Image (tube, rainbow, N blue to C red):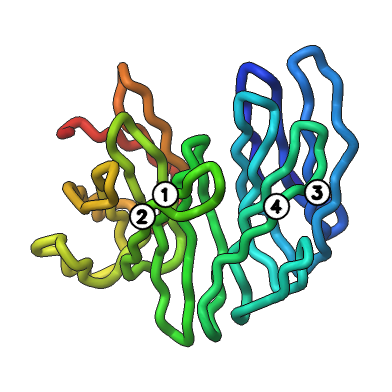
Amino acid sequence: LINSISVTSSGVTVVGEISDKPFFISMTISGTFSKVLSIGTSKTSLTTVARQSDGSSSAFGASSETLGGKKLAGARDGVLIKITKSGALSTVIRSSAPNASRIWLSADSSLLLSGSVQTGKVIETALTKFAPTFNPTWTTRVPSLGQSVAISGGTSAFLAISSKAPVSGVTGWKPAAAALLLLGYSDKGVLNGAWALNQLTTPISLAYSKQYGLYGLALSSDQSVSIFHLTSR
């Protein structure tokens, strides 16, 4: 099962599962594959990957086992994993909170990440911008139903969530049922825009280009897939 693919001018990186165990593999533009790197057991999942221009990669997901010498701190920790150009695991950072189940669900090449944080029945989405060293430069949390996608766009950051509760800073947002909410943030992590798509429910992916702006894929309540485009930015 392939969970994520990332492409740069230097090659291609893929993460996924083989027999319920996470794996990583990369390929150069000339078609030379690295060895398959197994990371953890079925207690670890790799949901997304970001390849860098130098051929190294960063993989993200969750783990409830010791990984890279780093022990479990919460119920399940989000993990950030740095992998060298040669395909060797070099760094593991855990994102944890007491009794919380965490997982990173999306990431882009600028290391803008989104993921869910669940403590008891309370579910939030964490949006964090990391430095190349995996140190957070800013972070924020919003109530959600768990699923999220984030992407950098110019000097902004965009977060799409499935929402069914008021969000601090978003005036008038009181959905009667689950709906898609798109949030915009400055390069310092300050909320500066919000757009509601009540006919959609669950974000799937986001894409951004300087020429065309922000596009996204999302599910509606009948499970059909729709494309949306942000025009008022």
Sequence order check, earlier mark of 2 and 3: 3
Q: CA distance from mark 2 to mark 3?
A: 29 Å
Pick the front one: 86 or 227: 86
- Give the residue at x 69% y 33%: 56
Q: Is residue 1 left or right of residue 154?
A: right
Disc 3 secondary structure class: strand
Residue 212 on image: x %, y %:
31, 21
Bin the neighbour count of mark 2 within 10 Å (Cα to Cα): few under 14, some 14-19, many 20 and up: some
Q: Which mark is residue 23?
A: 3
Quadrant location of residue 73? bottom right
Task: State the residue position of label 1.
Answer: 129
The numbered mark at residue 91 is: 4
What residue is drawn where x is 21% and y is 70%?
A: 166
> Rounded to the nearest whole Å, what is the CA distance between mark 4 and mark 1?
18 Å
How far from the left and from the top, in percent, is residue 143? 33, 70
Which comes before the other along the chain, label 4 or label 3?
3
Residue under the point 40% across and 64% down: 125
Residue contact between numbered discs 3 and 1, judged by CB atoms under 8 Å: no
Amino acid found under the numbered disc labelled 4: Thr
Q: Which residue position is annotated with label 2?
A: 138
Q: Nearer the viewer, mark 2 or mark 3?
A: 2
Q: Residues within 10 Å of mark 4 (few under 14, many from 20)?
A: some
Q: Amino acid at mark 2?
A: Trp
